[in-house]
Every structure is written in C-alpha cells, then in structure tokens.
Amino acid sequence: MLATLTPLDWKRRAVKYYPEKTAVIDGEKQFTYREFGERADRLSVALDEAGIEKGDHVAVMIPNTHYMLESFYGICQLGAAMVPLNYRLSAEDLEYIINHSDAKMLIVDEEFTQPIEEIRERLSLEQVIIVSVAGQETSLQGTDYETFIQSVPADAAPPEVEFDENQLLTLNYTSGTTSNPKGVMLTHRSNYMNAANFMYHLNVRHDDIYLHTLPMFHANGWGGVWAITAAGATHVCLRKVDPAYILDLFENKNISLLCGAPTVINMLINEPKAKETKITTQPRMATAGAPPAAALIQKAQDILGLNMIHVYGLTETSPFILYCEWKKEFEEKSADEQAAIKARQGIELAFNGETKVVRSDGEEVRWDGEELGEIITRGNVVMKGYYKDPVKTEEAIHDGWYYTGDLAVTYEDGFIEIRDRAKDLIISGGENISSTEVEGLLFKHPDVMDVAVIAIPDEKWGEIPKAVVVLQEDAQTTEDDIIQYCRAHLAHFKAPKVVEFVETLPKTATGKLQKFRLREEHWHGAKKVN
C-alpha cells in the first residue's frame, strides 16, 4: 500500500530518531523533539475534545513563536486545515478572511487581539483560544492556550486519522489589493513536495540551526515549518524582525540558515551594527518575495558574509517553483557578474514540476535573454484552487498551467529572470521599461537605501517612470543627481523623469513592496496603459 505524502509524518520521524535533540528555541524557552511532539499532540487532543474534526478549519494569528509551530502540527494531524492569518491586516480584512474561510476556531496571540475585539460579534467562530503574552492585556474573551493543552495528559495520543494527500492541509490567504483576499488551497501533497524542494535546494542538514526570520503565516514559512523538522534540525523562533537582534543571534545561536524578502536583507545591511559585526558562521540565506537587485545581493555577501540563495515562487505554488542553481563555473566570474547571476530567478526545482516563459500565444519564448513573456507552471505544487471562488480559479489556471502574472526572459542556459510584474511594467511611448531594471541600477547608487520605480501618467508619452527613493542617512543627493545617474547607465527613455524622496516605502508584513499604493495618487481617475 502506498504511503500518503504528508509533511506531518516528518514530526513522527523527528520524535523517533531525535527525541532529545533541541527542536525549538524561543527566547528563553527550549523544547526537545520529544517535548515539542508532546505539546503538538496535546493540542490535537484538546482540539478534538473541543469538537474540531477532520475537514474543519482553524484560524491561527500568532507571530513566529513555538505556539505557531505547534499549531501547524497540532491542527493538521487531526485532518483539519489550518488558516494562517497575517496579524498586520486590518480588522476589515480579518473579518472577511475568518468568515470566508469557515473557521470554527481562532487561536490568537494576545498582542494581536485588538482587531479581533473590534469584529468579534460579527465572526462565525465557535471558540477563541488566546496565547497569553507577558505585559499584554485584552478584553477578548477566550480560553488560555496553556490551560487548553495542559488539561490533556502529556502522553495522550492524538486520534488516528486517515489522510488523502490531495485534501486541504492549509488555507493561505493572499493580500487583497483591488479586491478581497483569495484563499489559496494547499494540499498535503503540495506542502510535502515544496518542503522536499526546500530541504534539497537549500541544503538543509541535521545540524542546521534555522532562524525563522520569514513570517510562518506566509506560505507556511515557505515550507520551513515542515522541512526543518524533517531534517531534525533546530527551529529558532523570532517574534519580530529586529536587525540588531538578528545580527546577535547569528553568533549567539550559531545560525546557519534563514529566509527573508529583499527588504529584510536591506534592513540587515543598513543596520549600523552591521559595520562592526563580523559574522563567522557564514549563514545561507534564501531570498524571494520580490526580485532582489544584484547590488543588494552583493552587499549582503560583502558586508555580512551571507551566502545568498535566490528562490522564486508564489503562495499559489506552495511557494517554490524556481531557484538560482549555483555552478562551479560561476566562481571564475567577477563579483559583479556573480551577483547579477544570483539575481536571476533560475531554473525548475527538482520536485515542483514544469515552469517556463511563454508568449501570449502560449508558445515558449526564445532562450536569448531578450524576448519577454509570462512565467507559467504546472505540476506537484500548484494550488488546488481558490477557496469558494471557481471564477478566479479558472482565470488563473488554464489547461493545467498556472499563470503567474510575472514577465520574464529565459537565457540560453535556461535560467529565467523576471523583468517585471505585468501590472508594474512601464510602457512609455510604446517602449517597455522594466521597473526592476531601473531599481537594480539605483541600488548601486551609494546614497540610495531603498527604491521603487513606478509608472505615472504623462500627456505626451502615456506614462513615464518615476523613482520613489529612500536615501541613506545624511545623504544630500538631489532629484537631478538621480536622473543623471540613470541616464549615464541606461537608455535615456528608461531613466526616471520624476524623483520623489520619502522616509519609507509601503510594504507588506512579508516585505513585498506595495507599488499599487504608490501609484494610487497618480492614477486616480486615469487609465493605466497596461
């Protein structure tokens, strides 16, 4: 009889072979795999006694703590589906997601109960479990998490449940921009295959110490919540992203692996402490979420000594579908050339299926690094669909292929490189301008800390590029300096015609740049070309 593919089985394996190995470090608290397994099992039994059954949905809004890790295993091994919530969403969005997901229960961190208090009477929840946090108070009524699980004996075994690998494991909601958030249905199989890619391509080892810099609610920590357990490695929890604290953890906890969006890299390299911190552990860091500039990757390697690994994916694909495979021949290239290669999204991972770049007629683009097309993918990690939304599902998946909306080229070696999101491409006077290309150049400017390039309407050209720039502290760079710098390194039509200096750029909780918010003030009442 064939075994069901489910990442939940990796907890059983870890408890069996590494019972006394440190599984989780969360501040002053530590748990072995035996202790972690016991806590997850107690949660399962408590949930079962509270009426949670196979097929039910349980929403969880907790930062990167051991409680969040326990929830992934404790909920899902009952055959229920976990709905990880972004704790930075508005009360309105949370109300929509909780009700739309048909969640019967909510497990919430006390620090993030305020928006739930506002909407509690409008939620269809049957029960609320609250994780107590020192120094926090809430008026939200619910059962204390520790009380909830401690009522169960330490040696209690969770109910045995038969799994179908194609059944729902997690229901992950995308951030809504122009419409309501969409519920991405990820199965036991898709999570398993993605985590296998995580293990293999990020070279996860038994003795790795993994820092959860990336929010676990974001595509299940990109699969890290499963993959680290599979290897019997150690999870190090991080309640919030604090660059100075992270730099300390590299040495204090011997961190060997972490993941994060380019904005996290930017925060680390611009942390004043980075100049005086020598990281001897040389951690591997996977980055995705937005195309990272080559200059940013080079700074991460030069300043911090990080070994950067570029991956690419979307929530709808569990999320990994490409990674930038590093070849020995690349070592002979200059540092600039190596960084440029690492900025490419790369090639298919071993277990995800097929990914390619196609023209509008569905045919694959030439492998010349020039012809632009859309990235599409099919195979083991593509979502089951959008929850209760067959129309949006049909719009996204055609003939088994998921259309990503990312525009890219393919080089002669098969490496794919994103040039822009379809909605972010700037079309000025009929010429296509890649916002990421202009951003990549500006990240090389010594006075630029962060940047976003967007299209704004123009009477003559239809639209023109605008750079929104965050300068380094005490920098005196002017708008004309930025424009002339770009004109010196790019075709003149690609150079920004307008530059705005700001203190910060709008980003999601996972570090994705929200260009739509920057465009809103310019395009209100006007029609964007693409």
Image (cartoon, rainbow, N blue to C red):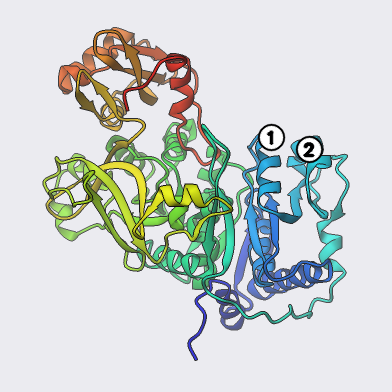
Q: Are marks 1 and 2 in contact (CB under 8 Å)?
A: yes
Q: What amino acid is labelled 1 in the image? A: Glu
From the viewer's perspective, is 350 left or right of 320? left
The spot of residue 115 in percent (x, y) is: 75, 36
| Point 56% across, 69% down: residue | 167
**Residue linked to disc 2:** 119
| Chain-order first, disc 1 or disc 2 | 1
Q: Quadrant of the C terminus?
A: top left
- Relative horizontal placement of residue 111, taking residue 97 as reference (left or right): right
Is 448 on the left-hand or right-hand side of 160?
A: left
Is 197 drawn above or below residue 273 in the view shown? below
| Residue 135 visible in the shown view | no
Q: Dot 2 surroundings within 10 Å: few (below 14), some, or many (20 or more)?
A: few
- Helix, strand or loop at label 2? It is helix
x%, y% of residue 38? 72, 74
Instruction: Provide the residue designation for mark 1.
Output: 92
Towards the viewer: 444 or 499: 499
Q: Residues within 10 Å of mark 1 (few under 14, many from 20)?
A: few
Q: Residue furthest front?
A: 391
SS at badge 1 = helix
Give percent across and percent down for residue 275. 42, 34
Depth check, front residue: 315 or 238:
315
Instruction: Please name whichever residue, 68 or 460, is drawn nearer the observer in this view of the structure.
Output: 460
The part of the image, by quadrant, that contains residue 297 is: top left
Q: Is residue 389 above or below residue 167?
A: above
Residue kind at label 2, given as amino acid type: Ile
Q: Position of residue 72 (x, y in %)?
A: 63, 62
Mark 1 to mark 2: distance in Å? Answer: 8 Å
The residue under the point 33% across, 56% down is 377
Residue 163 shows in this picture = yes
- The residue lying toward the viewer, choosing from 280 and 384, is 384
